[in-house]
Amino acid sequence: MTNELGTDGQAADEAGAALPSMRVDGQVALVTGAGRGIGAGCARALAAAGAEVIAMSRTPAELDAVVARIESDGGRARSLVCDVTDIEAMQAAVAGLGRLDICVNNAGIGRPGSLLSYTPDDIQAMLDVNCKAMVLVAQAAARLMVEQGRGVIVNLSSTFGKNGRPLNSVYSATKHFVEGFTKSTAVELAPKGVRVVAVGPTAIDTPMTHDRLQDPAVGGDLLARIPLGRFGQVSDVVGAVVFLASPAASLITGTTLMVDGGWTAQ
């Protein structure tokens, strides 16, 4: 009797094969928004998994601290001071890498506010970073990856990319943009050996968000929507990023791995 894998014995051999590695040894990984929070965590985690990390942000002091921490842990990293909204500088910086295996498209901003209170500057700032810069970083990375015939782009989405959220309409819209962009580019680049995926965190407790999450009105409402009953930690997100960037996820593309404690399952 045969099946899709051949004989039953062959199928058993396949089932008993060693698990694919979640290591990324020898690979080159770019992380944008790497100076703090999730970006800094992704840089450290990818370095711990064996990658040479290029940490990009616009703040030299923060990048220096991240690189120093990685090196003290025995990893390899270097800083690349660049604002992703400085398009020409960003494109030149990415092209200058020469090789790129992993791109974590993490840089993003949020400006909570009501629809009636948003200013044109508020709207433009979120569109510039969360949409325009994300596309152009992915484009610059894909140019290198297509030439190599391999690569992984990991875009940072959000629970707000799946659901609506009062007082966050424009931010939510930009994350819905990320969802559509991820799916479409994944289908386009798959024949060229490049995977495109996304990670969708819930509320993550970082130095930047901690005070808001402790606010009973804001944090209490968010926490009530998470079935697992806790806010996310940076470690929760970086585990998903490393997995998606690794050979263990080699058949995964065009989808979002939700790291949301069950929020979007409801």
Image: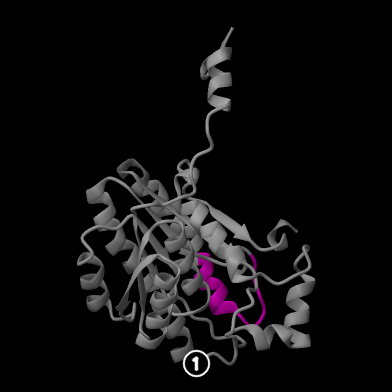
Residue at 21 percent of width and 65 percent of height: 95
Residue 159, placed above or below residue 9: below
Looking at the picture, tell me which residue is in the foreground, 226 or 79: 79
Mark 1 crowdedness (10 Å alpha carbons): few <14, some 14-19, many ≥20: few
Query: In the rendering, at what x and y percent does residue 185 appear?
Result: 39, 54
For the rendered model, the colour scheme is: one colour
Q: Quadrant of the C terminus?
A: bottom right
Q: Position of residue 155 (x, y in %)?
A: 46, 63
Does residue 231 appear to the left or right of 115 in the view shown?
right
Give the image quarter of residue 92: bottom left
Quarter of the image where the N terminus is located: top right
Q: Residue 68's x, y, as percent?
A: 40, 77
Q: How many marks?
A: 1
Residue at mark 1: 119
Rendered position, 239 above or below 7: below
Q: Secondary structure at mark 1?
A: loop
Judge whether 82 appears above or below 73 on screen: below
Corner quadrant of residue 129: bottom left
Picture layout, residue 133 above or below residue 260: below
Say whether residue 71 is magenta.
Answer: no
> What amino acid is labelled 1 in the image?
Thr
Seen at 63% across and 73% down, the residue is: 204
Residue 207, how many percent across, how many down? Answer: 59, 84
The residue range painted magenta reads: 163-176
The residue closer to the viewer here, 124 or 129, is 129
* Front-most of residues 134 and 81: 81
In the image, is 77 to the left or to the right of 41? left
